[in-house]
Amino acid sequence: MEKVENIICIKNINKKLNNKTVFKNFHIDFYKNQINCIVGKSGCGKSTLLNIISGVMENDTKNFQTIDNESISYIFQDDRLIDWLTVGENINLVVKKLYNKKKCDALCDKYLDLVGIKEYKDYYPQMLSGGLRQRVNIARAFIYPSKFIIMDEPFKSIDMINKEIIMNNFRKILEKEKRTVLFVTHDMDEALLLSDKIYVLGNSPVKIKKVFENKNITKDEIYKLI
């Protein structure tokens, strides 16, 4: 049984959208310093869950327990880059108040290497493909020294070869940096390659159907519950 100090408790999530109750008194426990993956049918509430946990979307009730949003890096489905800043400037923007320029540049290079696009540091976002822009988005989330990284389908615009390289590098960084990741995906290959725990959500209002340890499970076992 997991020790309490290894658990992050999210409690009392309540949300109605367009008069539909998406979450009602919903509780979920995530595991610290692990990659917690959330899967389920399209529209079941996965992205809404991330948005409420992070504070991007307001919970409907006040007795809500979540994580400190100052400790979060969020990788959105859209990259939200600033077009008039270079790739390097976009990444350094989130840490320029924390470090001097020399350290910012060194960290920027480190995380651009992580996602395989160091040579694009002086490019502007409009010069890049959607997949390259999303890799900048991932590097920008990692450079900020947050305790939590929240990712909403972060790899969907990246081709399979580069996706696997990034995910393998991602794991190596997390082994050293010990961050907690909450990760939504529709891609079961991504879930199985990257995650430590896999949460299957469903029903209306949302329930947790099952939590899998990512050990010797198959895509079919997960799909049967979705």
Image: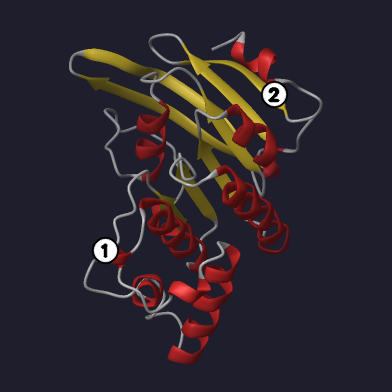
Asked whether 219 or 40 is in front, the reply is 219
Image position, residue 7 (x, y; %): 64, 39
Mark 1 burial class by Cα count in 10 Å: few <14, some 14-19, many 20+:
few
What amino acid is found at the position of numbered circle 2 in the picture?
Phe
Secondary-structure class at tag 1: helix
Q: Which residue is mark 2?
A: 212
Question: Which x, y percent locates residue 46?
Answer: 42, 28
> Which disc is residue 126 wearing?
1
Kindly identify the residue that appears in the image at 38 percent across and 12 percent down: 205
Which residue is at 25% across, 66% downward? 82
Can see residue 120? Answer: yes
Locate residue 4 relative to residue 138 in the image: left or right: right
* Amino acid type assigned to the residue bearing label 1 in the image: Gln
**Residue 207 placement (x, y as % from top left):** 49, 14
Q: Secondary structure at mark 2?
A: strand
Disc on the earlier residue, 2 or 1: 1
Q: Real-space Cα distance between discs 2 and 1?
A: 40 Å
Instruction: Name the residue nearer the viewer: 42 or 64.
Output: 42
Image quarter of residue 93: bottom left
Whether 90 is drawn above or below 14: the answer is: below
| Residue 8 percent location from the top left of the image | 58, 40
